[in-house]
Image: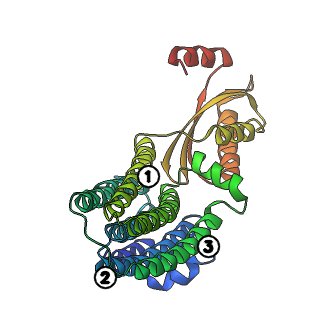
Amino acid sequence: MPIGLTHLVMRQAFRLSGKGWAGLPALLSAGGADARSVTVIAALAGDLAIAVLKFYAAASTVSSAMYAEGIHSLIDAGTEVILLYSVFAARRPSNALHQLGYGREAFFWSFVAALLILAAGAGTTIHDGLLQIAAPSPLKDVRLNYAILLASLCVEIVSSAFTLRKISDSKGWRGLIAFARTSRDTASLTVLFGSLTGVLGLLLAAAGIASGEVLDRPWLDGLASIGIGAILAVSALVLAGQAKALLIGLSASPAKVRTILATAREEPGIEAVNGAITVHIGVDQLILALSVEFAPGLKAVEIEDVANSMEQRLKAAHPDVVTVFMKPQSPERFAKVQAARGW
């Protein structure tokens, strides 16, 4: 991704945030969407630096694997520019045409980023690997490759460590695994996959270059390039699947739903909370529909007061709940509806 285009998109992202470039320092200590911005910016800076090193080595040594790694880092940087824009675009306030806001912009741009990884990243590296296998070019000055691979690995590890620390919430590997399984934060998930596949790609490139030199089989360098392309393809397909699920409407995690129901049951005036329907309209924005049975004997104005009080309680305990709908329903009727749905 050219530096000029990176600057242009970042400037537009900060314009959407309403803070401009002056708001950048405040991101460093913020949470929520601002914390995601820091994660993406850190990964972007690392990938741009690594891409320059890799392309220099590829041009100097005629290494297909190193060129594939350069493409890998460049595509990662490109996706991170897209993701940075998406974080701020999704935060625009609601209006008459978009009454629930723009939260799903984050999911749309994550899907675009996944397609970019698949088409430009995986497609290019596999193509170049096949060319190297069909007509192998002898490697030159592989020591430069090793030096740049080592430097790139150091930068990638630092960038990955920063990303992992940000998204695992200081809970170690358990927090990381939970994040990968349940998170709807497509921007951070894309950065995480980019970091991990970056390390794997560097190791694979090193193996391809070393084996091609030692065995005098330069086509092994091309094979490593194909392997890097395969890693990118798998990563892109996983990310695209997650973004697609969110775009068409994905519910909150079961653990999240349980905590919401527990909060709702604390409200006086509620006889029973039967269940909930949830859907993500943004990374940290949920629409909640509750099936509840109000206490018998309540008047209409009292039911309204109970409903309003419950909504305030839910939003205070769960800031990502932006809209609450309630349906008065007996547990028996709710059970029949659920049985008919087959859930």
Q: Label 1 vs label 3: CA separation?
A: 29 Å
- The answer to which image quadrant residue 31 occupies is bottom right
Residue 130 position in % (x across, y down):
25, 56
How many C-alpha atoms fall within 10 Å of the one at disc 1: few (<14), some, or many (≥20)? many
Is residue 109 left or right of 298 when viewed as pictured? left
Q: Amino acid at mark 3?
A: Ala
Residue that label 3 marks: 30
Q: Quadrant of the N terminus?
A: bottom left
Residue 26 position in % (x across, y down):
57, 80
Taking the image as drawn, is residue 299 in sight? yes
Residue 149 position in % (x across, y down):
47, 75
Q: Amino acid at mark 2?
A: Ser
Q: Residue 235, which numbered label?
A: 1
Q: Earlier in the sequence, mark 1 or mark 3?
A: 3
Residue located 65% across and 49% down the image: 178
Figure check: 185 above or below 205: above
Residue 206 position in % (x across, y down):
46, 68
Q: Quadrant of the C terminus?
A: top right
Is residue 26 left or right of 144 when viewed as pictured? right
Residue located 73% across and 41% down the image: 263
Q: Secondary structure at mark 1?
A: helix
Are discs 1 and 3 less than 8 Å apart at CB?
Answer: no
Q: Amino acid at mark 1?
A: Ser
3 or 117, which lies in front?
A: 117
Q: Label 2 vs label 3: CA separation?
A: 42 Å
Is residue 62 left or right of 28 when viewed as pictured? left
Q: Earlier in the sequence, mark 2 or mark 1?
A: 2
Residue that label 2 marks: 60
Q: Secondary structure at mark 3?
A: loop
102 or 256, which lies in front?
A: 256
Taking the image as drawn, is residue 321 in sight? no
